[in-house]
Amino acid sequence: MASKQKLVVIGNGMAGARAVEEILARGGADQFEITMFGDEPYGNYNRILLSEVLNGSHDAADIFLNPLSWYADNGVKLHAGVRVEKIERRARQVIGQNGEMEPYDQLIIATGSVPFIPPIEGLYGADGSYKPGVFVFRSLDDCNRITEYAMNKRAAAVIGGGLLGLEAARGLQNFSLAVNVIQRGNALMSQQLDSPAAAILRTTLEQLGIAVHVDKNTSHIIGSERVEGLQFSDGSKLDCELVVIAAGIKANSAIAARAGLAVERGIVVDNHLRTDDPRIFAVGECVQHRGQVYGLVAPLWEQAKVLADQLTGTNPDSAYHGSKIATKLKVMGVEVASMGIIDPAHEGDEVVQFTEAKKGTYKKLIIRDGRLVGSILLGDISKAPYLAQAYERNTPVPEERLSLLFDIGAPSEATSVETMPGEMQVCNCNGVTKDKISLCVKQGKRSLKTVMESTRAGMGCGACKALVSQVIEWACGGATEEDPSAHYFVPGVPLAQPELVAKIRERKLKSVSAVFGELAGGVEDPASKPGLASLLSTLWAGDYIDERDARFINDRVHANIQKDGTFSVIPQMPGGVTSPAQLRRIADVAEKYRVPLVKLTGGQRIDLLGVKREDLPNVWRDLGMPSGSAYGKRYRTCKSCVGVEFCRFGLGDSMGLAQKVEQRFQGLDAPGKLKLATAGCPRNCSEALCKDIGAVAVEGGRWELYVGGAAGAHIRKGDLLCTLDSQEDVLKIAGRFMQFYREHARYLERTYAFVPRIGIEKVRAIVVDDSEGIADLLDEAMQRSVDAYKDPWLEGDAPATSHQFTETLSIVQ
Amino acid sequence: MEVRLGPIATIPEGEGRTYRVGDERIAVFRSRDGNLFATQASCPHRGAPLADGLFGGATLICPLHALKFDLRTGTAQNSDCTLRTFPARLDASGHILITLND
């Protein structure tokens, strides 16, 4: 085997270390002998969390990403605490400050950035170093020095009212001294906020006890031996004993410039992160790509991946095309998030805005051609993760703009992630605490999917998923990873829904095993099976090849599994209407099979709980009623009120309509459950407004059709889709809507998420007004599925698989 | 001790079935790619019937609370629970043979 190439990395910060991690993840240890130089005498730590160390919420020891042992374990030679003096390109070697010499075949420069120091007189002492009391805020050592010096001081000033300056200011308050922020311009965080937002932020900070001085240009530092105050160019002064300079950063590109590489505002790199020397790459805050220099962490993750793809040759097509950045101020008691542009820039840019200055709340969105191009959130940033995603991925935003600013109908989040105690349960279904998620992130899981897989957080009712995301984001200081499979229809087949549907149709894949065979390299992922089964059944209806192992147990035995392994049996009861004879039969069955619990369901049916698997076929036969399909992701039931028969307010025959709905859509499988209701008048006794589909009779013999409602883990009032003239029209349009949902929703996406994602206007255009000319196709597809339906309880007499209803088999010799 | 449970055709492809072997209950799984796995029948977490789980490759998802087990080792990906596993194979006549631990 050829000898390994020598790879030298200058810089052991977040960029350098991440690049090496990415290279190792691609098997780089077999290709390269890796040597790293780091200025600081430590392993690699999370620089974004320095402000939390300063404010005391994190221990310095907690922010280490890779301890020194990590380097040894991975065969990486680390010169810790050694500054690189020069790069000798002709000899292909780098020289450290003590004469350490390391030859390279490939070199990565990841020197990060250095604080920008404005021209202020009196910064330095006689020995040329900073005068006692003057600090920058960049490294763990800076942080420790500030902490030490701040003890027993009365007043501090932070020069710079940007992101870093404000984080430092809030951190300094931890030392019970008066904290001042000095801003040269007239507004705080001018890169991220417009002027109304900056004004609100200023008030918020002042309420927290931080004095904000704007339009102040510091001309010199008062005090000969140590800092005693600041002198401003307008003649005013400020007493303080400690100054932190946080006036911005600049790329640390000096070493590259000395080596003769192209350097402008940073080291100039191409889309492969390569400098103008083909053996030298650069990554992180020290680089300039397409004229942009980044001072935040997210671009660095993307760059490190591309660099590793290129260097190891794993993916020669990999390229970096720049980053879209969402920023967040991580300061206790101040919630700020910002992304993209801060003011409309083009004609036609749409601005959606909300201000409640008294509460410190400000929300602003800038939308261009239906996509988010900028946003500022102050005070309440609960929508920030969602908006950041829409911004970064450039996905269309819902027509209902209000839903971008507020969670309407959802329970408000009681606590912010930051202040939430560690033992607090995030996932109430599976009992997963904030601490448990943090631990999982520390162990290297940085995406929602991987954390969910290893903790089961969010895998119960799913209502906490957004919160789990926020905790992950908090725990890794914003360095979350997006799992590509988040966009797949199911995790085990690497295709999004439209592409998956196209491939299935094109290759005529009619069974789940065929899909794994053709589209997933033959690798079966059990978690993906039910989703694929549902999709295939929708696409092929009667031609679907139904492999029973792809079904969840409930759909194999047509009953709902209970905690003790017994089952619940719910017979069909269309419209919630029963009869004395039927009730007698149910009672007889309950007694004969010693059913431990008989209970009314929320869907107006009768549930027999605790039925043994072996008894299922006999129970069904004795009941003589079809399945109520109260299991699985499918049409469940249609609740109704009494309607016109007895009710003195009834306007329409809700009971009759519910029975027709049930007859038509019984057992229909779908990406998520479908719970329906019909109401005989707008009093809505059957709660039709919070159902996946609800039909409400109104005066004049008409029916209002609502879609996308919910009242379970998530609460949402349905959107009015249309008003129809007859029951037949309700059946037709409800069916067409269901088919549209079946074909376009993500697996497990309920209509309450699907309808707002698509937008009710668009749903209405397609389903009611046939804007895309697919109404007939949808109706025909629905009809095929309706025709393909067979009562699954008939399998009680003709099992579909061997020992389908046997609980325990005996040995057969 | 090796025990013969019965013909492989008893277990549909991609599914599991529970067998009573003396005092023990054993879940046996038959994968679509032709492998056999045998484990304890009840989930150590809350006693779920494991043979009812979704299964593919060598991965089993418990039907009650979605614990994800590697059937080759018995370890769970998302929990501290571990399954007892038993070597399983087919004999020449297509019957399932499992080896009990003692």
Image (cartoon, coloured by chain):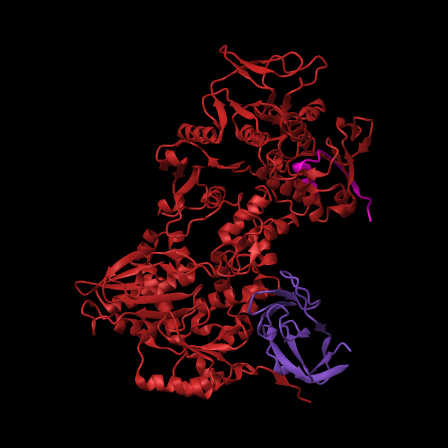
User: Taking A147 as reference, is A21 above or below it?
Assistant: below
Q: Which residues are magenta?
A: A1-20
On the image, the x and y values in percent for residue A626 come to: 39, 80
User: Taking A622 as reference, is A109 above or below it?
Assistant: above
On the image, the x and y values in percent for residue A241 come to: 60, 19
In this rendered view, identify the residue nearer to me: A807 or A58: A58
Q: Quadrant of residue A539?
A: bottom left
In this rendered view, identify the residue nearer to me: A468 or A701: A468
Does residue A770 appear anywhere in the picture?
Answer: yes
User: Taking A717 as reference, is A371 above or below it?
Assistant: above
| Residue at image point 30% right, 77% down | A577
- Left or right? Give the position of A626 relative to A517: left
User: Looking at the image, which residue sits at the far front?
Assistant: A152
Q: Quadrant of residue A635?
A: bottom left
User: Looking at the image, which residue sits at the far top?
Assistant: A235
Chain B on-screen colour: purple
- Left or right? Give the position of A250 relative to A351: right
Q: How many marks?
A: 0
In this rendered view, identify the residue nearer to me: A480 or A175: A175
Say if the magenta span includes residue A5: yes
On the image, the x and y values in percent for residue A460 come to: 51, 61
On the image, the x and y values in percent for residue A677 come to: 32, 67
- Left or right? Give the position of A28 relative to A484: right
The chain letter of the red chain reads A
Q: Quadrant of the C terminus of chain A?
A: bottom right
Q: Quadrant of residue A246?
A: top right
Say if the magenta span includes residue A717: no
Does residue A624 appear anywhere in the picture?
Answer: no
| Residue at image point 79% right, 28% down | A95
- Left or right? Give the position of B33 relative to A191: right
